[in-house]
């Protein structure tokens, strides 16, 4: 009786049936919009893509939420400061303080922007350990810019050669401006549905099943004072 009572409930199949996204723009521009407008556009586009009414959505979530529903709208948005990831709140602990401590212990901190130092130092350590070349990291930026050409929602849609990426303005160590992600304002949404909901609304032809998912938080090894890569 005990083992029968402790059995996990059967897993339900989950499908993505609609997605929506705003165009991502540079923070602080004249036509930038606030959270409600960004969220509204992304959500309405997701509903239009799914071709279902808003009344069919049982829950709408922003962040990590656990709940049972046949149809839910997952929404994310960001509105950043014009100068990027500066510290704006001095009355609370910065959530990445521990990560910066690892950087200080390994390489120290210079006058360069702090976030590029974090990623650049991880790359530097990777080079020292595995012989990685600067071209390997530059190819990531080259690939991403190449993809942006076909995405109308990208903040930038210019394609660059590998040489142009490597020769662009230096930000920190080997990192150049065309290898760094920009600050952006924008939003995106997805509608998730159960198998029963997909069948009810005839969405089989557009439904994309989620076969697996995983979520993890920082591990103790993340704060290993000997390695920036794990940060």
Image (spheres, rainbow, N blue to C red):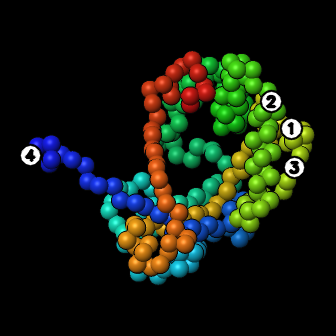
| Quadrant (top left/top right/bottom left/bottom right) for the N terminus | top left
What residue is shown with label 2?
Answer: 134
Using a 10 Å C-alpha cutoff, classify the residue at mark 4 as few (fewer than 14 neighbours), some (14 to 19) or many (20 or more). few
In the rendered structure, the answer to whether residue 179 lies left or right of residue 47 reads right
The answer to the question of whether label 3 and label 1 lie on touching residues, with beta carbons closer than 8 A, is no
Inter-mark Cα distance, 3 to 4: 65 Å
What residue is shown with label 3?
Answer: 160
The answer to the question of whether label 3 and label 4 lie on touching residues, with beta carbons closer than 8 A, is no
What residue is shown with label 1?
Answer: 166
Inter-mark Cα distance, 2 to 3: 16 Å
Q: Earlier in the sequence, mark 3 or mark 1?
A: 3
What residue is shown with label 4?
Answer: 1
User: Where 131 sits versus 206, above or below?
Assistant: above
The answer to the question of whether label 4 and label 2 lie on touching residues, with beta carbons closer than 8 A, is no
Inter-mark Cα distance, 3 to 1: 10 Å
Residue shown at 56%/78% (left/top)?
48
Q: Earlier in the sequence, mark 2 or mark 3?
A: 2
In the rendered structure, the answer to whether residue 111 lies left or right of residue 224 reads right
């Amino acid at each position: 009786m005990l083992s029968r009572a402790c059995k996990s409930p059967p897993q339900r199949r989950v499908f993505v049936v609609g997605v929506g996204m705003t165009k991502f723009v540079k923070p602080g521009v004249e036509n930038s919009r606030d959270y409600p407008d960004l969220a509204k556009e992304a959500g309405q586009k997701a509903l239009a893509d799914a071709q279902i009414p808003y009344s069919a959505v049982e829950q709408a979530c922003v962040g990590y939420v656990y709940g049972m529903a046949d149809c839910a709208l997952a929404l994310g948005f960001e509105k950043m400061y014009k100068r990027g990831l500066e510290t704006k709140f001095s009355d609370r602990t910065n959530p990445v303080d521990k990560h910066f401590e690892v950087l200080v212990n390994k390489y120290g901190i210079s006058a360069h922007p702090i976030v590029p130092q974090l990623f650049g130092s991880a790359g530097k350590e990777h080079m020292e350990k595995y012989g990685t070349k600067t071209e390997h990291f530059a190819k990531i930026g080259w690939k991403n810019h190449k993809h942006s050409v076909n995405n109308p929602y990208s903040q930038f849609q210019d394609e660059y050669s590998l040489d142009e990426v490597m020769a662009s303005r230096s930000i920190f160590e080997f990192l150049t401006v065309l290898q760094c992600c920009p600050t952006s304002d924008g939003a995106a949404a997805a509608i998730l549905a159960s198998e029963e909901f997909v069948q009810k609304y005839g969405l089989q032809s557009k439904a994309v099943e989620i076969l697996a998912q995983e979520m993890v938080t920082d591990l103790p090894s993340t704060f290993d004072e000997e390695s920036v890569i794990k940060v």
